[in-house]
Amino acid sequence: MKIAFLSSEVFPYAKTGGLADVAGSLPIELNNLGHEVKVFMPKYNLFGEVEHGLHYQWSIGEIPVRVAGKVHSVHVHTAKLPRSNVEIYFVDCPYYFHRFTVYTNDHDEDERFILFMKGTIEILQRLQWAPDIIHCNDWQTGLTPLLLKENYGWDKLFEKTATVFTIHNVAYQGRFSKETFYKAEIKEEHFLHGGLGEYEGGVNFMKTAILTSDVINTVSETYAKELLTPEYGEGMQDYLRMRQNDLYGIINGIDYNVWDPEKDVLIPFQYSKENLSGKLQNKKFLVNHLGFEFNEDVPLIGIVSRMVSQKGFDIIGYALNDLLQLPAQWVVLGGGEQHYEDMFRDVANRYPNKFYFYRGYNNELAHLIEAATDIFLMPSRFEPCGLNQIYSLRYGTVPVVRKTGGLADTVLDWNEYLAQGKEIGTGYSFNDYTGYALLLSVQRAINDFHLKDVWYKIQMNGMSKDYSWKKSAEKYIELYKKAVIKVRSVK
């Protein structure tokens, strides 16, 4: 199968969130399964051409692409994704992409990604490479299915091409004024009231993708169901219900070459589920480094997160005084909204012997927290997929999460399954989005931490789970087949 994979960010070239990790990993696994994959992203001035082995494609040369009535010159550079044979094509237009940031609040943000989408299609034409699948990710690629049908429908190259659209976070939709469709040169009928791209008097890239893609998916099964509700759908729920039969959920994978305590080069003591002794050594190392008194019978609780309300920091705030009375030590890594940073800075000053706060991001410390802590807290209001809870499972660190999105799909509550006579739990979860529900779940975890046989069983259950990209890639192939069958049965 030939797969064109479009993403506004790809690790290691540009990253603002989990989308970059997906785009840097999933294509490699698809390739490993025997499929031909080409990745497409904008060429930002955020990374070095020499450093990443980029080559200018003289065989393609200059491509004129018209956006908002102006013709821009697009050039193409290619490289191979690290440790793979997967080609990545960089759509180069300095006028739009040399801004030292992936996303902007500039007046022409819509034009930037219209050019990326049109440029990608034009590159496919120059290559005369007919993909079976064009896999679009998030709003920055959301007009692609409609552009293929309308603006490029004349080209037989795409006659059998199916489109898949992945929603990584429905909160970010690409909403612009109605002039955006003129800029893209798409038929006026599509942005009149009730049209494919019209939303609240303006243009919505995500709505357009939802209504024009052949198949839609998101990054966990539970999130796919949640998106159909007003609580989580962010205004897209009615359109997603219209496409419910074409909506699927596939959990993101993780890279076990990077996130595995047996291989992790960023932690002082490596360990495995066959020998957990290194985990205790990491805990002692971190606790001593933080200036706490080490006691292996006192649980160390970790948080690594962006500090925004979506991640549950409002309910952590409500419960914080009670949480601090529990017999536990805390290490928190993250940054975000000022009032949450101030809250943790204040707590760290008041409880220097049991609470440590590192503002910002530190990759080495993030790995050490996963390896050294006993409990990992992730009480998100909503969480399309989530990665840290999956890292925690592999590191024998027991997650406490809110039962939503990918957290619900990956963390099985110990007590819930124990009540059914099943010892298969991998952590603790709660439904109500309240500080009290969070507090009770942390208390349950601490109580079981002292029951060493129970705790060991929970750790082993989590460490045995397989959330590798290979498993996710196999599910994406099945999804692609559904899309191809749908398109070719119609034609």
Image: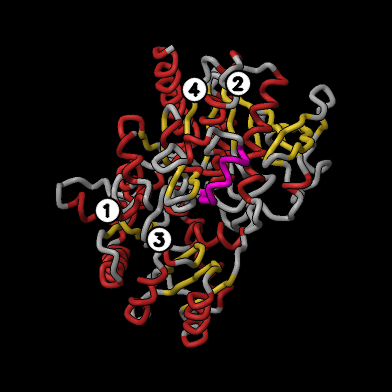
User: Circle 1 sits on which residue?
Assistant: 413
Is residue 85 shown to the viewer in this render? Answer: no
User: Circle 4 sits on which residue?
Assistant: 162
**Which label sits in the foreground, 2 or 3?**
2
Is residue 315 shown to the viewer in this render? Answer: yes
Disc 1 residue crowd, few under 14, some 14–19, many 20+, Cα 10 Å: many
* SS at mark 1 in the image: loop
Q: Image quadrant for the C terminus?
A: top left
Say whether marks 1 and 4 touch (CB < 8 Å). Answer: no
Which residue sits at x=70%, y=26%?
123
Sequence-wise, the earlier of marks 4 and 2 is 2
User: Circle 3 sits on which residue?
Assistant: 378
Separation of marks 4 and 2 at Cα, in angstroms: 15 Å
Sequence-wise, the earlier of marks 2 and 1 is 2
Relative to 262, say whether 440 is above or below.
Answer: below
User: Circle 2 sits on which residue?
Assistant: 36
**Which label sits in the foreground, 2 or 1?**
2
Relative to 380, say whether 326 is above or below.
Answer: below
**Residue located farthest toward the left when viewing the structure as drawn:** 420
Is residue 177 inside the magenta stretch?
yes
Which residue sits at x=58%, y=39%?
23
Magenta residue span = 174-184
203 and 354: which is toward the camera: 203
**Which label sits in the foreground, 4 or 3?**
4
Separation of marks 4 and 3 at Cα, in angstroms: 37 Å
Separation of marks 1 and 4 at Cα, in angstroms: 39 Å
Relative to 82, say whether 202 is above or below.
Answer: below
Sequence-wise, the earlier of marks 1 and 4 is 4
* SS at mark 2 in the image: strand
* SS at mark 3 in the image: strand
Identified by mark 4, the residue type is Ala
Percent position of residue 297, x then y: 38, 70
